[in-house]
Each structure stands twice: as structure tokens, then as C-alpha cells.
């Protein structure tokens, strides 16, 4: 009983899935990607296990769907959004995002979760970018 209460309390300090999806949409818009739910769609990558694709993060893929069986769908971006801080990374490019609209949203999320920007530990390691030679922040 005590461990389930502890789990519930820990989850209470995480953002909701819909908030993370909103963060991913903000980043996509920043990159001039229009998710229209017809030809360009966003899907959760957290469906295989309870822990998700990357523990501690919500993960989303943005896919351009092909309208022809002769052409494959194209993955445009794969985002990881921290459940505590809304810190956001592109998984394939190992790009960390920081721009005013996102920073404002992150500040609001941190206020709700009680987290601070350093609460994610080493996000590059968590998302598989620790060995990346160069980190390219996406900023204004």
C-alpha cells in the first residue's frame, strides 16, 4: 500500500501526456512543421511499456504519411519531452530546444510539477546522445 501511494505521489509531479503533446507541437511549429493529422501526423512512441520509450520522457514521432503504396512513410522528427521539466530534445539529431514560447511553457510546467531545470540529471545520456560530438541548441 505504501509503495502505491509513493508511486501516485511521484506521478503527481509529472506533466500530463496532453501537455507533453502540446510541447511537441510548439517545437514542431517552431521548426515550420505543420501537423495537420492528414498528411503529417504526430504519434506517441510510448505504447510498448508502462515506462515508455525512454523512462522519464514522453516521446513523439512526426511522420509524413505517403499517399501511395509505392512510397514509404517518412519520419520527420522524433521528440523526447521530459515529464518533469518539459525539456525537449530531437532524438535523431540530438538537438536541444530553447526559444521564448517554449521557455514560457516550460516555466509553467515546472511551476506545476515543482521541478527545476536541473532535475532531469543528464538528459543527453537518458535519450542516447551522450556520445554525440556536438550538441546544437535550437534557439533564436
Image (cartoon, rainbow, N blue to C red):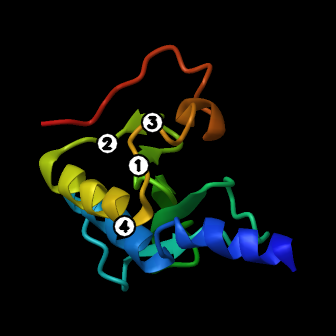
What residue is disc 4 on? 112
Q: Earlier in the sequence, mark 3 or mark 4?
A: 4
Q: CA distance from mark 3 to mark 1?
A: 13 Å
* Dot in front, 4 or 2: 4
What residue is disc 3 on? 118
Which residue shows up at 67% across the image and 53% down it? 54
Q: CA distance from mark 1 to mark 2?
A: 6 Å
Which residue shows up at 30% across the image and 55% down it? 106
Left-right relation of 14 to 98 = right
Q: Earlier in the sequence, mark 2 or mark 3?
A: 2
Q: Position of residue 42 (x, y in %)?
A: 44, 73
Name the foreground residue: 120 vs 39.
120
Q: Earlier in the sequence, mark 4 or mark 1?
A: 1
Report if the CB atoms under discs 3 and 1 are less than 8 Å apart: no
Q: Position of residue 13 (x, y in %)?
A: 52, 65
* Dot in front, 2 or 3: 3
Q: CA distance from mark 2 to mark 3?
A: 15 Å
Amino acid at each position: 500500500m505504501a509503495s502505491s501511494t509513493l508511486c501516485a505521489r511521484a506521478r503527481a509531479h509529472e506533466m500530463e501526456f496532453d501537455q507533453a503533446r502540446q510541447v511537441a507541437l510548439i517545437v514542431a511549429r517552431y521548426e515550420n512543421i505543420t501537423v495537420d493529422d492528414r498528411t503529417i501526423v504526430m504519434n506517441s512512441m510510448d505504447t510498448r511499456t508502462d515506462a515508455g520509450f525512454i523512462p522519464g520522457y514522453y516521446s513523439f514521432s512526426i511522420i509524413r504519411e505517403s499517399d501511395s503504396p509505392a512510397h514509404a512513410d517518412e519520419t520527420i522528427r522524433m521528440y523526447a519531452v521530459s515529464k518533469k521539466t518539459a525539456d525537449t530534445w530531437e532524438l535523431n539529431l540530438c538537438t536541444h530546444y530553447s526559444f521564448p514560447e517554449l521557455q514560457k511553457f516550460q516555466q509553467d510546467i515546472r511551476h506545476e510539477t515543482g521541478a527545476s531545470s536541473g532535475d532531469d540529471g543528464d538528459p543527453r545520456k537518458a535519450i542516447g546522445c551522450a556520445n554525440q560530438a556536438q550538441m546544437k541548441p535550437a534557439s533564436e
